[in-house]
């Protein structure tokens, strides 16, 4: 790649690399047999292209079940790997979620694992999909994070991926992210737009939207995302899968040198228990010895010794959730009550979630976005609408002096203390709220380029609270009629309100979020178990 | 105080307030009976001014022993409080360590505690001295942090002092700190210079030098300091007392909005066990619920299940310690070996402690020191030599742009990871080093205005490692002759080398420091117990 190539030339080379990686699929997929145009909902496509055995391997097992089969050698790592490689290729053909399929690399790894006299590692033989932004082991692995300027960049691996590798996993597919990795959708000049596997007219969310789309069609059952404003939880919610954003610094993440707002890596997966397995595996490796800023604390599963006290966040005081979200909250709250839990309201009036957005959006870009915008425009690639939204259209975003950064940071910490007091105040009756149950977004997966309200996820990034997302239902026009009488409270509320008609959101998954106090990660996942039990999911 | 008053007028008013607070002492101290000039070593002065009973109360008990007597009501809180109030006044007359004596406030508190039907709180009745910088409860309490510009400032209390208060302590004396609170000595235009209670020609250290001087003459047996570059450990070392700097964010501290380099509050005390009591008391209050950035972790005392592996830091590769420090290291290392511990060297060659100083000194002042210098010069007060040293004379200190701050922060984190790897590498034989035993300073307490090398403490602030300081011996001209053949390795080494003659350091305490990995606070204090046992201090 020469310096004088146009950005389009560079992108063409990357796409060629991606497409060539998909040409490796063997036996090749019978893509010509697919209907044209593709159906709105991609969930039926795998069955058209994969063998019954591949369908069985990729659909019939939870992560733990598959691991048990791999560990007992009832099934070879290579057979599992090939099944997921082929299904990932199906996902790519359906929703454009891959940056690269690692055919040879994965099969070589699988054969190595199969050759071991004894299975080794907590993730022995498990195919894990990875976000392109995160880099990876391998001499020739490039990591562009969807910046044209970085097309040839080779930053190398990271601690989390190394621990997963040492635990015996197979990396086999790398997934898309949006320009700047700071959209709640997944669209870039390099890889194009990733689509929702339940409805092509909707986004799979972002920034880990390649993961959510891939996992949402079971081209993967465990992947790694990153979350600084919702980038694990929102795409997981939009694709009907599970996602967990740990408290920052439980496990490694983040851009070196930035600490005003930290990001978290975390699991995205088809099943609940895999999230805890992911965290346990990473923390068993004592990552704080290598990256000393990490919290010095093993993962010790939490056990409730009495029924939960849950606070339901019906809305955040800024944007009213769409009818399907309200219905999901109502249903889950009722199930929790029926199971004997105490259910109260999380009243956001007075909690200033709008102010939280002002603080966090400013701290995302203390340089006013100069670095990111310079990287984009310097490479000649177009600035996408959601990049403009998150940098240029936020009044809070501007270059800060050191003193202004201090002031913003002080506001951040004061807001965190303020919110902590509100949480503690729920214990005045002797029983503090265990977790908040709330939306993961104002609605189900949005139509493309319309993800312009981050509040239901970014709020918890500002507070650094752990959050888990889980699927509840799907949009149902019969039950989820638009409230035609509602009068929006502000411009953002109006924008989101006007987006909604049940027909537009056809088949879209509806998910909710469970939030705990900072560093109460184990408690959040334990609460999810209790809440899902109340929903009849043991 | 009017805006038009000169800085000298403002200072005169503060000194008047201090002096008036000392006039409250009852019965008054017979200060006229003191020799003039005062002896170089102040340790004999209390016996000239206090009653035998006051001497008994202030000298004969450890913190835990005194607490036991208070809790069992063998002695009243008021009697203990009066004894320490009067001894603190003696300390003030001897070494100028107080900003204020809280006579009425403390006696009122003591009487309240005596009036309780049952003793309450882990620190019931214990007089605790406090650093003026930290503020305190009370409507009329001002907190100037030794800035003339802040003479009328009332920032209020802080979480740690509130927890100590709730645990039943008595606040009775507030102590001095230097201009900017960023000298390793204690001199300001407001309060003048605080002296070492073992030798008036030497510094008690700083910035918590009012505390170390007061506790060094047993005008207090437990006080609170703060440490961002050595400000607990170095003054504790210079005054022959114990001091502990926890890992940051175990307990509350710091200047709001600043996070590049954090500070720690911590205990300074006459005895070892009080440090753990202090930490346990604070963490039992679950401070993370109020200040959510704090680490979510109780204090769980560490138990060694085998003999320690200790690495001795003979020097830091930059400045060679003075002979008494080397002797102390030699003696303690020999005692540890004799007790069955494994003793290895902590070789700093290649560990770039000079680079660590470059990073941390820059991150102390990302605004180039503009805020602090503006506060000083704006009030018209003179800039003291050690203020010039730490801001103007450090080539690394300059105003940073956001991008430069990111770069420095990245260097900080890379250095931390680099150092962690070095520590982990000590475990290649299957047994990682438990703690580092090293100097707390290049020498004993320095002559005034000469504390111009921070490396033996600031190194561990940069790394955010916990550190405890303990007394070992005193400078002994017979054993600690200057090495006349030594050839300094660099300018800093030369400066420190030339400072030393055994005569200059007459009677000065010699202390050492124990360092643990980040967040291994409990282990550091447990190691101190083992090491002191090896020294015959059970």
Image (cartoon, coloured by chain):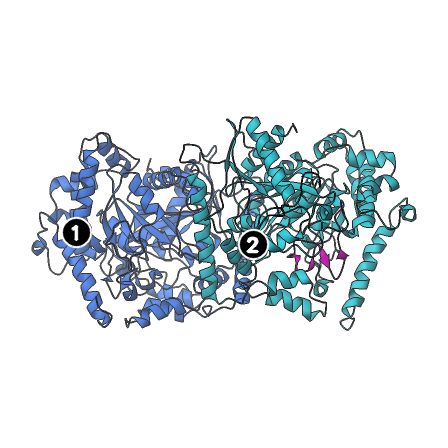
Chain colours: A blue, B cyan
Give the mark, 2 or 1, whose residue is nearer the N terminus: 1
- Which mark identifies residue A418? 2
When the figure is inspected, residue A100 is found, relative to residue A368, above or below; the finding is above
Q: Quadrant of residue A57?
A: top left
State the SS at label 1.
helix
Q: Is residue A190 visible?
A: yes
Depth check: give the residue in front, A62 or B205: B205
Depth check: give the residue in front, A192 or A512: A192
Point 77% across, 38% down: residue:
B113
Residue A75 in picture, x, y percent from top left: 18, 34
Q: Which residue is mark 1?
A: A89
Specify whether residue A172 is painted magenta. no
The answer to whether dots 2 and 1 both sit on one chain is yes
State the SS at label 2.
helix
- Which mark identifies residue A469? none
Spatial CA span between label 2 and label 1: 48 Å
Point 61% across, 60% down: residue:
B390
Instruction: Please identify, in this view, whether the residue under mark 2 or under mark 1 is nearer the observer.
Output: 1
Specify whether residue B183 is painted magenta. yes
The chain to which mark 2 is attached is: A
Quarter of the image where the C terminus of chain A is located = top left
When the figure is inspected, residue A184 is found, relative to residue B468, above or below; the finding is below
Residue A449 in picture, x, y percent from top left: 30, 65
Side (left or right) of A499 relative to B420: left
* Stretch in magenta: B177-197
Side (left or right) of B53 relative to B128: right
The chain to which mark 1 is attached is: A
Secondary structure mainly formed by the magenta segment? loop
């Amino acid at each position: 790649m020469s310096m004088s190539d146009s950005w389009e030339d560079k992108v063409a080379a990357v796409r060629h690399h991606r497409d060539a990686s998909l040409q490796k699929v063997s036996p090749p997929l019978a893509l010509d047999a697919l209907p044209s145009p593709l159906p709105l909902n991609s969930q039926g496509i795998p069955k058209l292209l994969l063998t019954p055995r591949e369908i069985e391997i990729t659909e019939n097992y939870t992560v733990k079940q598959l691991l048990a089969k791999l560990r007992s050698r009832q099934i070879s790592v290579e057979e599992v790997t090939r099944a997921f490689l082929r299904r990932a290729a199906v996902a790519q053909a359906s929703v454009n979620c891959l940056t690269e399929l690692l055919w040879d690399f994965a099969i070589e790894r699988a054969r190595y694992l199969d050759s071991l006299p004894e299975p080794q590692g907590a993730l022995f033989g498990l195919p894990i999909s990875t976000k392109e932004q995160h880099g990876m082991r391998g001499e020739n692995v490039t990591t562009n994070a969807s910046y044209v300027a970085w097309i040839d960049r080779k930053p190398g691996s990271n601690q989390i991926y190394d621990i997963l590798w040492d635990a015996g996993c197979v990396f086999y597919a790398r997934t898309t992210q949006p320009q700047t990795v700071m959209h709640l959708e997944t669209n870039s000049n390099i890889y194009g737009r990733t689509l929702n596997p339940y409805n092509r007219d909707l986004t799979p969310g972002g920034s880990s939207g390649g993961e959510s789309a891939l996992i949402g069609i079971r081209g993967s059952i465990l992947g790694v995302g990153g979350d600084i404003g919702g980038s694990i939880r929102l795409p997981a919610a939009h694709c009907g899968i599970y996602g967990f954003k740990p408290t920052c610094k439980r496990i490694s993440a983040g851009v070196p040198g930035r600490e005003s707002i930290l990001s978290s890596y975390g699991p995205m997966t088809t099943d609940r228990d895999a999230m805890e397995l992911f965290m346990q595996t990473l923390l068993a490796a004592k990552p704080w010895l290598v990256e000393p800023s990490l919290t010095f604390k093993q993962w010790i599963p939490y056990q409730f010794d009495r029924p939960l006290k849950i606070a339901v966040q019906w809305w955040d005081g800024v944007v009213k959730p769409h009818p399907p979200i309200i219905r999901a909250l109502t249903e889950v709250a009722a199930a929790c009550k029926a199971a004997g839990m105490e259910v109260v309201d999380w009243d956001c009036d007075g909690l200033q979630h709008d102010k939280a957005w002002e603080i966090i959006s400013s701290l995302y870009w203390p340089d006013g976005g100069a670095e990111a915008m310079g990287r984009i425009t310097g490479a000649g690639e177009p600035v996408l609408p959601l990049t403009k939204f998150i940098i240029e259209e936020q009044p809070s975003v501007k270059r800060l002096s050191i003193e202004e950064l201090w002031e913003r940071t002080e506001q951040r910490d004061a807001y965190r203390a303020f919110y902590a007091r509100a949480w503690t105040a729920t214990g005045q009756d002797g029983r503090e709220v265990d977790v908040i149950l709330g939306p993961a977004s104002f609605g189900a997966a949005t139509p493309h380029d319309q993800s312009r309200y981050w509040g239901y996820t970014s709020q918890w990034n500002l507070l650094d609270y752990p959050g888990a997302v889980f699927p509840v239902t799907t949009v149902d026009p019969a039950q989820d009629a638009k409230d035609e009488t509602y009068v929006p409270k502000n411009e953002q509320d109006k924008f989101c309100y006007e987006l909604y008609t049940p027909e537009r959101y056809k088949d879209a998954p509806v998910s909710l979020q469970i939030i705990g106090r900072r560093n109460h990660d184990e408690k959040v996942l334990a609460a999810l178990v209790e809440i899902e039990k109340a929903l009849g999911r043991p």
